[in-house]
Amino acid sequence: MNFTKSLLDLYEANKEIVGIEKYSGKKKTVLLPLYHDSLRVGYEAVLTADGDLVEIRTVPDKDKDTLLPVYQPSRSRETAPMALCDKIDYLCDKGEHHDRYMEKLKKWRDSKFSHPALYAVYAYLEKGTLRNDLAAAIGPKKVVKKDMFVRFTVLLNKEELHTWTDLTLQESFIEYMRSMGGPVDIDYLTGEEVVIANKFPKRIRHASDNTTLISSNKDSFYDLVFTGNFDQKEKIASVGSESSYKMINALKWAVRSKGRLYGSVAIAVWCNPDIPAPKWDVDTYEMEQAMEGKPDDDTESEDEMEDLEEIVPENETEKPEETVFSEQQIIHMLDGYRKSMPIGSVMTLLAVDTPSKENNGRCAIVNHVELDGRNYLENIERWHKEAGWVHRKRLYSPENKVISFTGVPGMRDIANIVYGIEIDRKGQRVIGFVRESDRDLFYKKTVTKLMPCIWRNSPIPVDIVKKVAEKASYPLHYKNSYNWERVVKLTCSFYKKYLFDKEGKVFDMALDTTCTDRNYLFGRLLAVADFAEKVTYNPVADRKRVTNAQRSLTKFMLKPATIWTDLRKRLIPYLRKISFYRRERIINPLLNEITDMFDIEDFNDTKLSPLFFLGYDSQMMDLRQKWYKAKEEEEQAQES
């Protein structure tokens, strides 16, 4: 199925909610009716049925998105008023714009498709007092500008009729526009002979987006790009007026209610029939929360959140954080979705982008994927299992709690970790981007690379694996070692997925004590040295202190045998600080066990692969569990 058919079907499947404002999370969305658009409006004039002003209100920011009827889908340089809500320039300033607005409003008012609200608005604007009324309402400190938008509420039968939400007014305008007629030709979208469009709606990705999906501004034969092939633009393709509105309004609604922006690219995903389905771009924990019906707070990423509180690495001397979400729960969770996913369900992804940074010109459909609903769930399961690792996540609750979960981070967090740097945000160190333009660029780059991995089960791109592994090799680039831990864990996720794609190897998150690969073993050795030194530190005074193991990690990956000889000597004074019970029960036996697993020819200075990080992180997680258990046993023995 092509994308135009998908969008037309989406509009028809949701026609019962056309024109009705709904909230998707914290966002207000509406599936626009035919011949309607939406804009952000700052002021609202309340009128009586006779056209007398009651008051002028300032519209709250959360309610500024306003649905409005339009005579043509996009306003160009010529005088082109909208039907009701418009700029001050059209509503009250004398001149061509105002005269044209009043002329068109009068024709609608006097037609057989009139509405009582039209009489009130026309009568009020005819008095020419709106500019002064608005100036009095906003006060002397603000200036009435000609590009300010005003909408209208009319008191009919002692009740407020909001002209932007009233369904009878919407239907009145639709029938009025249908009665206007226009040139008739074959609609290439439906194959029917209907009134065709010569202009098309804009603002597809967001309210300030001035791009359009279909466009031709070449009206003269001599201006046509392919001179000699066509003498009229309509001969290239003709699109029905109503079909174009349905298609583009469905796309707008899908992007704003079911989609997300990644820089300049807007990605919408929906299911037909409309049933719950897991989001493809969120982390595993958030996906599980959605399955349980918990509210979606549309969390962005740590570098974008307010009131950040610095997260510190897990304290090796305290009880490790429990993993609240395991791999087995991923399977159970998706089984829940499978039970509600009927046979024949179709998941659709549509991505819209523009080649320029500015929000104008033409946009394009850059990706269109349709999958059987159950295949989509299988691909989601593969992604979260094959790339699954233990990650830490801040829950943005009043307690700023940090939890561990098994799975994969969301797309925005992945972009921050792979391409971002450690920055200062409100006095705290987080991973992100200094410039908004960089953030948009790398968000777009990340989803472009990883989208096929999830939707088409394609192999993970090698360059993104190498990039995050390289960043993990430089722990001293991070002042807050929690940020480095995030990079290491994502490296483990991606390299685990890479090995599965390339060789079919499956690496568990649990420590593999049988693996004799030198990369894995060197990772385990460094983890033991790092841990043994760290547990001797004061958790408060030495919180930001860097261990010798972390300080040497970059060189260690290049010449592991040589650097390990030096590290092992420097570890001796720290081992003496550890209690005899835990040193001889955990640390020394581990060092001996791992060293004995090497083949003699493998203990050399050949550069290490990213498998090193899987050995390092697995060993570190295992050590924390064993250390806490040994600590409890030692305390119990001392008490007895």
Image (cartoon, grey):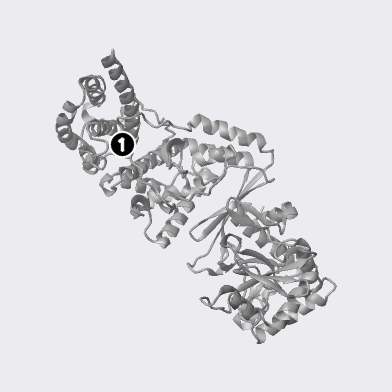
- The spot of residue 146 in percent (x, y) is 58, 79
The residue that mark 1 highlights is: 612
- The spot of residue 479 in percent (x, y) is 28, 47
- The spot of residue 74 in percent (x, y) is 64, 72
Q: How many numbered marks does the figure carry?
A: 1
Image point 31% across, 36% down: which residue? 612
What amino acid type should be assigned to the residue bearing mark 1?
Phe
Decide: few, some or many residues near mark 1? Use Cα within 10 Å; few <14, some 14-19, many ≥20.
many
Secondary structure beneath label 1: helix
Left or right for 101, reference 255:
right
Tell me if I can see residue 240 in this picture. no
- Looking at the image, which is closer to me, 206 or 443? 206
- Looking at the image, which is closer to me, 228 or 10? 10
Q: Is residue 455 above or below residue 423?
A: above
Quadrant location of the C terminus in the rendered image = top left
Residue at the far bottom: name it: 95
Residue 83 figure quarter: bottom right
- The spot of residue 409 in percent (x, y) is 45, 43
Q: Is residue 526 above or below residue 150?
A: above
Image point 66% across, 75% down: which residue? 233
Tell me if I can see residue 17 in this picture. yes
Left or right for 115, reference 36:
right
Left or right for 109, reference 344:
right
Image point 71% across, 54% down: which residue? 9
Residue 315 figure quarter: top left
